[in-house]
Amino acid sequence: MRYLPHTDADRRAMLAAIGAASIDALYRDVPEKARLKAPLDLPAHAGELEVERALGAMAAKNLAAGDAACFIGAGAYRHHVPATVDALIQRGEFLTSYTPYQPEISQGTLQYLYEFQTYVALITGMEIANASMYDGATGTAEAALMARRLTKRSRVVLSGGLHPHYREVTATFLRNLDGNVVALPLDPHGVEDPARHITPDTACIVVQYPDFFGSLRDLTQLASACHAAGVLLVVAVTEAVALGLVRSPGEMGADIVAAEGKSLGNALNFGGPYVGLFATRERFVRQMPGRLAGETVDADGRRGWVLTLATREQHIRREKATSNICTSSGLCALAFTIHMALLGEDGFRRLAELNHAKTVQLADALGRVPGVAVLTKTFFNEITVALPKPAEPIVEALARRGILAGVPVSRFHTDDARLANLLVLAATETNTDDDVARLVTALTELVR
Amino acid sequence: MSELRYTNEHEWIRIDGDTAVIGISDYAQEQLGDVVFVELPEIGKKVEKGKEAAVVESVKAASEVYAPVSGEVVAVNDALTKDPALVNRSPTGDGWFLKLRLKDQGELAGLMDEAAYRKFVKGLK
Amino acid sequence: MNEALDSPLLFEQGVAGRSGVDLPEPPRVADRLGGLRRNRPIGLPGLSEPQVVRHFTRLSQKNYGIDTGMYPLGSCTMKHNPRLNEMLARLPGFADIHPLQPVSTVPGAMELIGTLMRWIRTLTGMPSVAMSLAAGAHGELAGLMTIRAALEARGDPRKKVLVPESAHGTNPATAAMCGYEVEAVPANARGRVDLAALKAALNGEVAAFMLTNPNTCGLFEDEILEQAEALHRAGAFFYCDGANFNAIAGRVRPGDLGIDCMHLNLHKTFSTPHGGGGPGSGPVVLSQPLAAFAPLPYVIDGPDGFRLVEHAKDAPGARPFGRMKGFHGQMGMFVRALAYMMSHGGDGMRQASADAVLNANYVLARLKDVLSLPFDGPCMHEVLFDDRFLKDTGVTALDFCKALIDEGFHPPTMYFPLVVHGALLVEPTESETKEALDAFIDAVHRLAARAKTGDAAYFHGAPRFAPRRRLDETLAARKPVLRWRPAEAQAAAE
């Protein structure tokens, strides 16, 4: 078997050195009745060609977004990833290394994590960032937990513009702890006033920027209202590319930013693996979850990096840890870092401009379709439209024509009839004029 | 009483009237290694004998510092925030952690004196 | 020593106006940003593509990986990461599909996930598996939450969770996140959980026992059936941390041990790459009493094929406790794991486990007279040594490991588990040849002998030949510097 190097001779020699009669003898501590005597009912081993065929056949049954006109966002945005990214992350020294517990032979990992932390702090406008979380949704949940620890309060308010998955995950993480989670009503028009919900026991308000429906709103006043009441403002960002064009959450007064970094360097991957970006104020560092790469010197005085402030983490603090997180999203963070390095200031901005321009074009084109109303007036690369009839069957029909026309809000909220006609669409630099034209033509026909 | 008394969790306490000064022993700082951070309580906090009063962190470990007696926190050693290494250099002197206003002098009974503590530590090694 | 491989930080190399991409000029549009256009630069460095390639290539050359050499990190299962799996995960039909496409457009994705679930259920002997968890710790949290939900449904949430004193730190951290208190159960002289102590600790307040099996000392918990029986009699659930599944995959099923709930680490047992710290994937297998409470979303295996359940009402009898992650799970890791399983087959996985255990016992046999062994063998897939062999040498376990770096090996796991002093946990995995093991064993012999001659200075100065000498972790913790800052900001801060 190609991955298992031992020959029978090897095994015999090793058993002799051990002084055991057989490998089975090494399993003598397993209770007799729990030992499987025969192999399980599973296929036998297969060569590469066979495995390629089997999995290739499964892959071929799926409609790849690149073979369609794709306008789906809703928390995961399709961007072009330069070929360099994938080539570099597949270097074995990055791919097959572990968490950098032996820093002297992990300087590659530690330096890129330090660079990643810097990028995240810069684009979010915050002081410090960690070495990644699983994704934006779990990062948001951890931000709410962190806010509770910092304020010693237990109430968490979730905006009606927060991605439904982010709301659910945050509520789930809090379900077994004291305190309550207040989920504000869905806000498709971007008009809610979360500050009205501040109470003396509120630890944080969690908003999304731009929000789930695409809406861009200035958070400065909300931040001030929060701070006046000792409440922390947690800002979730699902589209990191937005930060290339719009004011950062940090400059508007965010206390913790939990973002999804998938847009840079990472493919859609049917929802995972993604990479959570987590940034906050320097004075909150000891309550921040996740790993941290920090600068130091070695015995010869040369600059190097190590994992630091580990005493916050599970392997030391155990039940008093800031989180139980261990493995996070290292290789995805590397992909993010490489993509950011390639883009640079000018590239990042230009990428964002392209996204926005395409979405303006999309919004204008959809607004001209009879019966379709564009609800979102200020946006980055995502908008919500109201169709004259339920969106889900239309989306299915468009899919059959090779058009992935966004996500019906009813996919998330199946029982609210008022939302049934709403559709959330995104446009990125990967969409062409032809994509927009095809969508508009087909949609016009289907809403008639 | 101006000599130190010790707990079996390696805290020391020195009484000055109705104020108790508290820190960790030389053995404790040696076991911890380089101290990197100290988490001190807020002034006014009420602590109970045997319960957590502070936390001391080294690179690889975090240890609770338990209150040897009950009382109210009247002072904390801010010098430790800038220079946590003070705990290593002067554990029973300048590396003190906090001062409590004592609730009950009776709680001092049962704490080890210098000689008894030295014997206790020897038994651990 | 290896300054030749150094590369300054990206931020120190950047030049304004440089870029490593060519993007078209954006069309001029009246923007819809609501006055929120960014009005100050971010300060990102500009580099050309060749610069970026060179930078990350140099960085990679300062890393040790499984591809470099033996990586015997106990509890991490650093086995070979097959490149076939990387290629398959990148097929556009897997990599370029959006999680929220109409499910009718991705039947192959459903099939991939459903097929993987079948393999997992067969290997574990458990009826149900929750796939959406992103890592072991995440799976552990989901597992405990499932248990809590099941208990709450009985009207009896209970108060605490028992863990062995040798438990990995995630276990008590997870229990706390779940609103449970944690109580430790001591080990017996043979390094296993003390059954009498466990029984004594059981009462109506105990929600669950969290066990790693094989345990963190590399030993199979031989009284596990009795543990399960005691737990179930007390109305508690049995959680198993599946980090060490590599010892028993294909040879023992958790379902046959009385386990109710176990997370798997696809990035350990099933070869998905460690990537410097993730991404992982931590599916959780569940017993019948727990299955209904599994978190959303999940894939159901029905008469009409596989389908995705995103809402409780779409699965009859489902009472999910909530959602643990955005979207559906780590699809990229599912593809890799299924490719691994298909490549090995049932026979290959059974042999892999056997070889993993054989390799660890070979290391035990050849090092037990040189290092110190706290528990007699046989061990499972990893062997635990402690630092008694270094007594009076002035060399610590850490020093010994740093010297091992100069021999060309990644050190074993150090100082874990905490139940012995100066733990050294060696997990060779089944990927290593006998020759590689012999080279490692010989290096350890040489170092142990050298330590005993009193040459402590040699060890204190190690490593000498790595890209960096020993790094000052105290300084990093006392004065945390967690990011690069532009010169003016740095000056202002000082």
Image: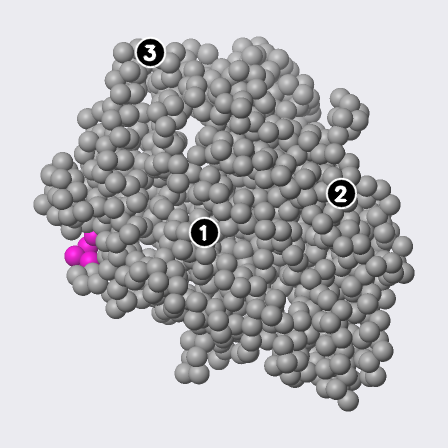
Task: Identify the subunit bearing mark 1.
Answer: C
Looking at the image, is mark 3 or mark 1 nearer the viewer?
A: 3
Going 9% across and 45% down the picture, which residue do you hit? A21
Residue type (three-letter) at the residue carrying disc 2: Glu
Local SS, label 2: helix
Between label 3 and label 2, give the one nearer the viewer: 2
Q: Quadrant of the image for the C terminus of chain C?
A: top right
List the residue tagged with mark 3.
C455
**C473 inside magenta stretch:** no
Position of residue A384 in the picture relative to residue A133 (left or right): right
Q: Earlier in the sequence, mark 3 or mark 1?
A: 1
Give the crowd class for mark 3: few <14, some 14-19, many >=20 residues within 10 Å: some
Please name whichever residue, B86 or A46, is drawn nearer the observer in this view of the structure. Answer: A46
Q: Secondary structure at mark 1?
A: helix
Say few, some or many: other residues with alpha carbon within 10 Å of mark 2 (under 14 / 14 to 19 / 20 or more): many
Q: Three-letter amino acid code at disc 3? A: Asp
Give yes or no for contact between labels 3 and 2 (Cβ–Cβ under 8 Å): no
SS state under label 3: loop
Residue displayed at 64% across by 83% down: A397
| Disc ID at residue C136 | 1
Numbered mark located on residue C56 in the image: none
- Establish if A339 lies above or below A182: above
For the question of whether residue C293 can be seen, the reply is no
* Kind of residue at badge 1: Gly
Question: How far across and how far down the image is residue C414, in percent?
Answer: 39, 31
Q: In the rendered view, does C76 fall on the left or right side of B14? A: left
Q: Position of residue A182 (x, y in %)?
A: 70, 62
Chain of the residue under label 3: C
Spot occupied by residue B121 in the image (x, y as percentages of width and height): 39, 17
